[in-house]
Amino acid sequence: QDDALLYYRSSDGGETWEINGVVIDGLGANYYPGISSLKYSWAQPVGNTIAFTFGFDEFDGLVFKSIDNGDTWQKIVVYDSPFDPMNVPSDIETYGCGDGTSAIALDSQGKAHVAFGRMLRSRASNTWYYSPLGSEGIIYWNESMPPLDSAVVSSYTLENLSAAGNLVGYITPDTVSLSISNDQPDYGVGLTSQPQLSIMNDNEIILVYSAVAPECMLDGVYYRHLYSARTFDGGATWSAPCSLNNDIEFSYSECVYPAVAPIYDGGHLYVLCQEDFTPGTGTGFGLGEENYLTFLSVI
């Protein structure tokens, strides 16, 4: 298998490794020809319960969970793709799936909560195509919910996700009249993407993600800002998203790649992001400006 995903475990601070380079069942050569990118994310452990996400791209979105500190693993399907990575059709009509970004948190009972970005993909003549400028939606799932499929994720509407309680992040304000230029930087992900989760012991969960900000534009393209949503009942209901960059100092700031402290202390939410002053990576504007790591302490 090319670029296998390997699991290691040390119980003495790295002096010795009792698990050394193991391929977890469900991730080996019988399931994937190769692990081509870093499409996984770890949860903060709860006791001996550990878990991580994997995939959430054109194929399945999975959680691998262990209740014995990694001795044995359970494979949990979050998003059930209609396509097998070992036998992919040469042509596929547009369908809804993940954009390759995901986050996971374990609540006080060890229950897994997952968020991932939505993407529209298709395939023609053995080549994958994706529609980052036509894809939005941060999707939420927990272990009390059934697996999602491409019908729920959908290639044309967010209503199915909303009706099932799975749509927790979207572009704000209302995007009915939002016009996206073909020059809009996409980062290879959807218009709403890069989710992060922070959790309290009482199962209050906060989602943070990056999305285009319709009120902030430069030369015909939108900046991206950070947004958050919150649940106080373990994921049953969620607040509407709100901007974390609504201060005037962020009017001309591109804020992406959020990293959130996995434990929320009830007072401040701690967020780190990458910031610069033009949308995208800078290449579209012929600029090679510096990026900044910006720390936010949100009350």
Image: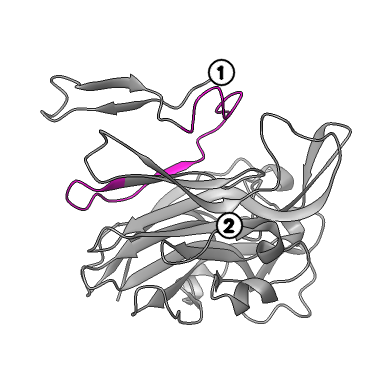
Q: Nearer the viewer, residue 125 or 243?
A: 125
In the image, which residues are magenta?
26-50
Residue 20 % position (x, y): 28, 19
Q: Tell me if residue 296 can be seen.
A: no
Q: Residues within 10 Å of mark 2 (few under 14, many from 20)?
A: many
Does the CB distance between marks 1 and 2 fall below 8 Å? no
Q: Which residue is mark 2?
A: 117
The three-letter amino acid code for the residue at tag 2 is: Gly
Residue 270 % position (x, y): 30, 62
- Residue drawn at (32%, 60%) of the image: 111
Q: Residue furthest right?
A: 125
Secondary structure beneath dot 1 equals loop
Q: Horizontally, is 30 left or right of 259 in the view?
A: right
- Residue drawn at (61%, 40%) of the image: 288
Q: Quadrant of the C terminus?
A: bottom left
Q: Which residue is mark 1?
A: 2
